Image (cartoon, rainbow, N blue to C red):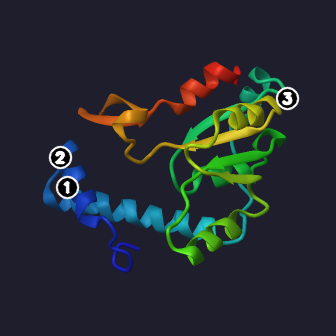
Amino acid sequence: WYRFVPVRRSVARAQVASRLVLSREETERVVREMYLRLGARVVEVFGPAPRWRVHGLEAVEAEVPQGQGIIFVTAHLGQFERLADAGLWRRRVHVITSRFSVGPLQTLWAACREGRVTSLVQPGADGRALRATLERGDALAFMLDQHASAHSAVQVECLGAPAWTSTAPARLAISSGA
């Protein structure tokens, strides 16, 4: 994946080097490993739904009664699919995700999730509709591993550097009781 899809490779190198005290060789090893894992996630997402074993669901089930909505925050690629494939506590799963600007990619993205998630929801969706989703006892996934704009986020420290992250999951949890 590192050689075939060099998207943002230089950005990844610069960010790893700026936050971790590593030699040039170690930085390159970390970035290559990251791309290897990214490639594996892509294969998982676009391949047939594997049988995942997720540990710890019983603890969540004990704390969150059936019928109460769940908000979970996850990485952008691979993680929400794992939760959906694992049955996510026998709930419908709705994922907030941006649309691809290239039509065929959006079609592929949606087709690969068919049967895995209930719906793909656009960022900025109406808060009332999101609350209603949670009030039905469904699960709502937020992918927060990308930069958030300052007008809809809060600044936090991440690996010693400022980063902006969305406040939407917390605001929705407070307003819906999820």
> What's the residue type where badge 1 is placed?
Ala
**Disc 3 residue crowd, few under 14, some 14–19, many 20+, Cα 10 Å:** few
Element carrying mark 2: helix
Q: CA distance from mark 2 to mark 3?
A: 45 Å
Residue at the (61%, 66%) spot, across then down: 44
Residue 153 location (% of width, % of height): 41, 32
Residue 175 location (% of width, % of height): 65, 21
The quadrant in which the C terminus is found is top right
Residue at the (24%, 51%) spot, across then down: 16
N-term mark: 2 or 3: 2
Residue at the (64%, 34%) spot, across then down: 127
> What's the residue type where badge 3 is placed?
Gly
Q: Give left or right: position of 92 versus 10.
A: right
Closest to the observer: 22 or 67?
Answer: 67
Please, is residue 99 above or below residue 15 in the view? below
The quarter holding residue 142 reads: top right
Residue 109 location (% of width, % of height): 62, 67
Residue picked out by circle 1: 14
Please, is residue 145 above or below residue 26 in the view? above
Q: Give left or right: position of 17 versus 170.
A: left
Circle 2/circle 1 CB separation < 8 Å: yes
Q: CA distance from mark 2 to mark 1?
A: 6 Å
Residue picked out by circle 3: 67
Element carrying mark 1: helix
Residue at the (30%, 57%) spot, across then down: 30
Q: Give left or right: position of 24 versus 124.
A: left
Q: CA distance from mark 3 to mark 1?
A: 45 Å
> What's the residue type where badge 2 is placed?
Ser
Circle 3/circle 1 CB separation < 8 Å: no
**Disc 1 residue crowd, few under 14, some 14–19, many 20+, Cα 10 Å:** few
Residue picked out by circle 2: 18
From the viewer's perspective, is the residue at label 2 or at label 3 nearer? Answer: 3
